[in-house]
Amino acid sequence: MAISKLLAFNLPEADHAAVVRAAILAKTKAAFVTAADYDQTLAALLQAKTLPIGTYEGEIPAESLLVMCNLSGAQMTNVLMSLRKSGTRVTYKAILTPTNLSWTPPQMLEEMAKEKAQFDALEKEKSAHSHAEE
């Protein structure tokens, strides 16, 4: 059976309790990944019994990230609703996939930033197009 877990990156300590509560509601566990583990793949971090396991010494992105690993739709809904209710702000929320399983946290954050930029550009284009039609 696949391991179910929330992997949290670069979240303020003040938000840890809210993430743990969200994990409990979703009947899963939360792991708070430290900068030392930014050289590890998401797969390795998911499998790790304790953290840290890495020796990363590179630049630490400012954005926060929450990766939902092997959660059902209902579990993800519970996590997201719980975080919203608590006021916990996370820059990027993602789902573990076969594609990103081999990525490191910096790679994941870079991809999330690219996707957000593409989404924002599409939204801006849609908005400009709808205003032009008025």
Image (cartoon, helix red, strand yellow):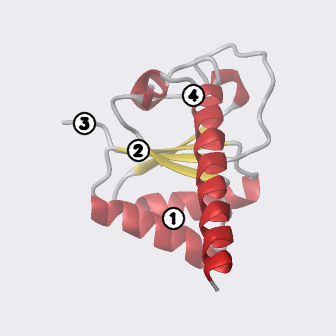
Residue at x-position 61% and y-position 47% = 118
Q: Amino acid at mark 2?
A: Lys
Q: Amino acid at mark 3?
A: Ala
- Between residues 43 and 19, which one lies in front from this camera angle? 43
How many marks do you count on the picture? 4
Q: Which mark is residue 21?
A: 1
* Mark 1 vs 4, N-terminal side: 1
Q: Position of residue 80 (x, y in %)?
A: 48, 66
Q: Position of residue 132 (x, y in %)?
A: 67, 76
Mark 3 or 4: in front is 3
- Contact between labelled residues 4 and 3, with CB atoms less than 8 Å apart: no
Q: Amino acid at mark 1?
A: Arg
Q: Position of residue 68 (x, y in %)?
A: 43, 48
* Mark 4 vs 2, N-terminal side: 2
Q: Amino acid at mark 4?
A: Leu
Can the viewer see residue 25 in this picture?
A: no
Residue at x-position 48% and y-position 64% = 22
